[in-house]
Image (tube, rainbow, N blue to C red):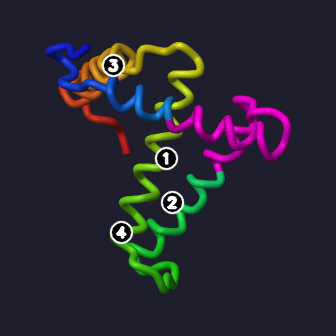
Amino acid sequence: MTTPESNTDFSSAMDRAMRIREIYHALETKNHGSAWTIQEDMIGFTYDVGELGRLLMADEGRWVYPGDLKQDLEHKLAECLWWLLVFSGRLGIDLDSAFASKMAERESELSASLAGPAAEA
């Protein structure tokens, strides 16, 4: 569901992410006797976040990277987003509402900080 404040709709992306996660669960069950727990998913996610960090370093010229950096950054960002969609699906969190609410809160806080007195140095 899209709200005017958020202008986002994660519903179809979440559905697709969960379908793909179910395929992984079937492979995990086939290969290891059971599907990964959410804790094991978190380990997979943190591994991908680490790879994303290296790619971002390479993009800044701080890590030597021999591959196709732009393509690999796109893929790793998409993969990290996939993990977040999977977590929200597994936890029963409405990501559309959560995102809209958090962004409204953050925007309000930041706007108030800009409007308030300057911080002392």
Of the image marks 2 and 4, the number of the one nearer the N terminus? 2
Rendered location of residue 33, percent (x, y): 85, 36
Pointer 3 and pointer 2: residues touching (CB < 8 Å)?
no
* Label placed on residue 52: 2
Rendered location of residue 54, percent (x, y): 54, 68
> Which quadrant would the C terminus be assigned to in this image?
top left
Element under disc 1: helix
Circle 2 packing at 10 Å, graded few (<14), some (14-19), many (20+), is: many
Q: The residue under label 2 is which amino acid type?
A: Leu
Residue at which label 4 appears: 71
In depth, the one of 96 and 109 nearer the eye is: 96
* Label placed on residue 50: none
Q: Which residues are magenta?
A: 20-46
Circle 1 packing at 10 Å, graded few (<14), some (14-19), many (20+), is: some
> Which quadrant would the N terminus be assigned to in this image?
top left
Of the image marks 3 and 2, the number of the one nearer the N terminus? 2
Name the residue located 75 percent from the left edge and 30 percent from the top edge: 37
User: Could you tell whether 8 is left or right of 15 in the image?
Assistant: left
Q: The residue under label 3 is which amino acid type?
A: Asp
The span from disc 2 to disc 4 (Cα, nearest Å) is: 12 Å
